[in-house]
Structure formats: C-alpha cells, structure tokens
C-alpha cells in the first residue's frame, strides 16, 4: 500500500491510502476461469443457431449479454457471475 498526503491552502491535511490489486493484463496467456470458458461456449452455441429460428433475436440478445459479462468478468460481482453462469449452463445444448 502507498499513501499520499495532501495539504490544503487552509491547512487541512488529508492522507489517501492506495491499495493496488494486480489484474491480468490484456493479451495475457493466463487460462480463463472455468466459468468464463463455459459462458463463452454458450455464446458460441447461441451464435451458431439457425437465423430462421423464431427465438433467434432472444438468443442473440442473451449471447450479447453473456459475452459482455465474460469480457468484464473481473469487474462483475459474485451474484452477477453466478446468474450469468446459470444462464449460460441452461442454454448450452
């Protein structure tokens, strides 16, 4: 942790504590979490469905949502992750 101390013109002193959490860098070769792999597999299956299917608009919307969540996995809370995984697993053929 690092700290920064700021002194204002009026004499007030503020100390900011900075805690850094390392994130996986873009382009990293680290393996994706299993849940993300499952979500991306569901996205692939949803995208490969026949466009003549009446539910294709719904499937496309679900694929877009799941793809966004998988891409921002590190920024999602646990509840969102659990719901996304449950949705993905229910849609996998």
Image (cartoon, rainbow, N blue to C red):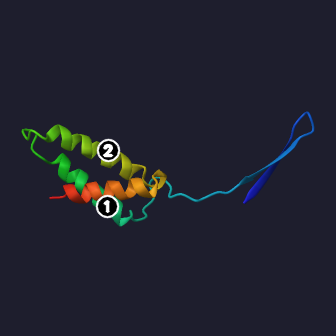
Task: Please identify the residue farthest to the right as the structure is shown.
Answer: 11
Helix, strand or loop at label 2? It is: helix
Which quadrant does the C terminus fall into?
bottom left
Q: Residue 65 shows which numbered tag?
A: 2
Which quadrant does the N terminus fall into?
bottom right
In the figure, 34 relative to 67: above or below?
below
In the figure, 21 relative to 16: above or below?
below
Instruction: Please provide percent x and percent y for residue 30.
Output: 43, 64
Q: Residue 37 shows which numbered tag?
A: 1
Q: Residue at x 34, y 55 (%)?
A: 83
Q: Nearer the viewer, residue 2 or 62?
A: 62
Q: Residue at x 53, y 57 (%)?
A: 23
Q: Nearer the viewer, residue 24 or 81?
A: 81
Instruction: Please provide percent x and percent y for residue 27.
Output: 44, 54
Q: Quadrant of residue 20?
A: bottom right
Q: Residue 17 shows which numbered tag?
A: none
Mark 1: few/some/many CA within 10 Å (<14, 14-19, 20+): some
Task: Please identify the residue farthest to the top as the structure is shown.
Answer: 9
Q: Are marks 2 and 1 in contact (CB under 8 Å)?
A: no
Q: Residue at x 25, y 45 (%)?
A: 62
Query: Disc 2 vs disc 1: which is toward the camera?
Result: 2
Q: Residue at x 39, y 64 (%)?
A: 33
Task: From the viewer's perspective, tell me whether residue 6 is left or right of residue 92.
Answer: right
Instruction: Please provide percent x and percent y for residue 26.
Output: 47, 52
Q: Quote the CA–CA distance across marks 2 and 1.
A: 15 Å
Helix, strand or loop at label 1? It is: helix
Instruction: Please provide percent x and percent y for residue 92.
Output: 19, 58
- Number of marks: 2
């Amino acid at each position: 942790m690092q700290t920064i101390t700021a002194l204002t013109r009026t004499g007030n002193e503020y100390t900011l504590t900075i805690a850094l959490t390392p994130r996986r860098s873009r382009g990293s070769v680290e393996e994706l979490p299993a849940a993300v792999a499952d979500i991306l597999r569901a996205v692939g299956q949803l995208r490969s469905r026949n466009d003549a299917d009446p539910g294709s608009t719904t499937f496309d919307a679900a694929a877009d949502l799941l793809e966004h969540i998988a891409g921002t996995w590190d920024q999602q809370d646990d509840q969102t992750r659990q719901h996304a995984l449950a949705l993905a697993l229910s849609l996998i053929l």
